Image: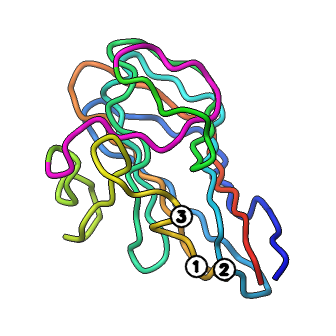
């Protein structure tokens, strides 16, 4: 079957990343046809934060499927840029140094049973949270590959997990490669 690509979900509008809290924004991917996901790319336009290591990002898709695709990266550096997180990224986010805007693989530097367990994500039921490397081995493909797209809700959750710093995200988008 032919594979296509499309930006089917758009979370436009500034999202303030509150200090030591979880914020979220949901989008509904509405299509008139049935498609199966083959790849996912999460795009951030103008992500700003004064202490990068505080940030954790979780995407929750249909049926509670989820991936914590960015966690505790960048050390004590501030960030201000646009990012794409995709299984096809050339490298992982850096653990201890600043991450310039660009395309990266999903990356998690905290133990899978640590601060990013489901009970620490506001509004997420007690379900296992999937973690990418180096802590885990999950990828967008292993979690979401084969998911159906019509009229599904996708939620981005951002957690600032230490007091003292805050930030913002201008907008975010989920881009899917899919097949019919």
Q: Position of residue 69 (x, y in %)?
A: 43, 47
Q: Position of residue 76 (x, y in %)?
A: 33, 13
User: Tags 1 and 2 in contact by the CB under 8 Å rule?
Assistant: yes
Residue 73, compared with residue 40, is above or below; it is above
Instruction: Tell me, for residue 36, which label it has, or none.
Output: 2
User: Tags 2 and 3 in contact by the CB under 8 Å rule?
Assistant: no
Looking at the rendering, the stretch of residues picked out in magenta corresponds to 96-113
In the rendered structure, which disc, 2 or 3, sits on the residue that comes first in sequence? 2
Tell which of 141 and 65 is nearer to you: 141
Q: Quadrant of the C terminus?
A: bottom right
Instruction: Tell me, for residue 146, which label it has, or none.
Output: 1
Picture quarter containing residue 153?
bottom right
Q: How is the image coloured?
A: rainbow
Q: Is residue 143 left or right of residue 33?
A: left
Q: Dot 1: few (<14), some (14–19), or many (≥20) neighbours within 10 Å?
A: some
Report the magenta stretch's main SS: loop
Q: Give the alpha-carbon distance from disc 3 to disc 1, as whole Å.
A: 8 Å
Tell which of 138 and 59 is nearer to you: 138
Q: Which residue does the image show at 14% across and 45% down from the upper left?
A: 114
The answer to if 92 sits in the magenta stretch is no
Q: Is residue 122 left or right of residue 92?
A: left
Picture quarter containing residue 38?
bottom right
Q: Which residue does the image show at 56% across and 72% down from the upper left?
A: 145
Q: Which residue does the image show at 27% across and 44% down from the upper left?
A: 135
In the rendered structure, which disc, 1 or 2, sits on the residue that comes first in sequence? 2
Under circle 1, the secondary element is: loop
In the rendered structure, which disc, 3 or 1, sits on the residue that comes first in sequence? 3
- Report the residue marked by disc 3: 141
Residue 168, compared with residue 13, is above or below; it is above
Tell which of 61 and 180 is nearer to you: 180
């Amino acid at each position: 079957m032919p594979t296509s690509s499309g930006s089917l979900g758009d979370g436009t509008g500034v999202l303030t990343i509150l200090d030591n809290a979880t914020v979220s924004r949901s989008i509904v991917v509405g299509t008139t046809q049935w498609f199966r996901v083959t790849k996912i790319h999460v795009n951030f336009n103008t992500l700003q934060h004064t202490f990068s290591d505080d940030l954790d990002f979780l995407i929750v898709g249909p049926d509670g499927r989820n991936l914590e695709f960015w966690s505790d990266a960048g050390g004590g550096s501030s960030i201000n840029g646009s990012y794409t997180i995709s299984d096809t990224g050339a490298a992982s986010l850096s653990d201890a140094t600043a991450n310039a805007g660009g395309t990266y693989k999903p990356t998690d530097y905290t133990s899978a049973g640590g601060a990013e367990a489901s009970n620490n994500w506001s509004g997420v039921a007690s379900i296992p949270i999937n973690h990418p490397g180096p802590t885990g081995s999950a990828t967008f493909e292993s979690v979401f590959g084969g998911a159906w797209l019509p009229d599904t809700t996708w939620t981005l959750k951002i957690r600032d997990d230490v007091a003292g710093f805050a930030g913002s995200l201008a907008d975010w988008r989920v881009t899917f490669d899919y097949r019919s």
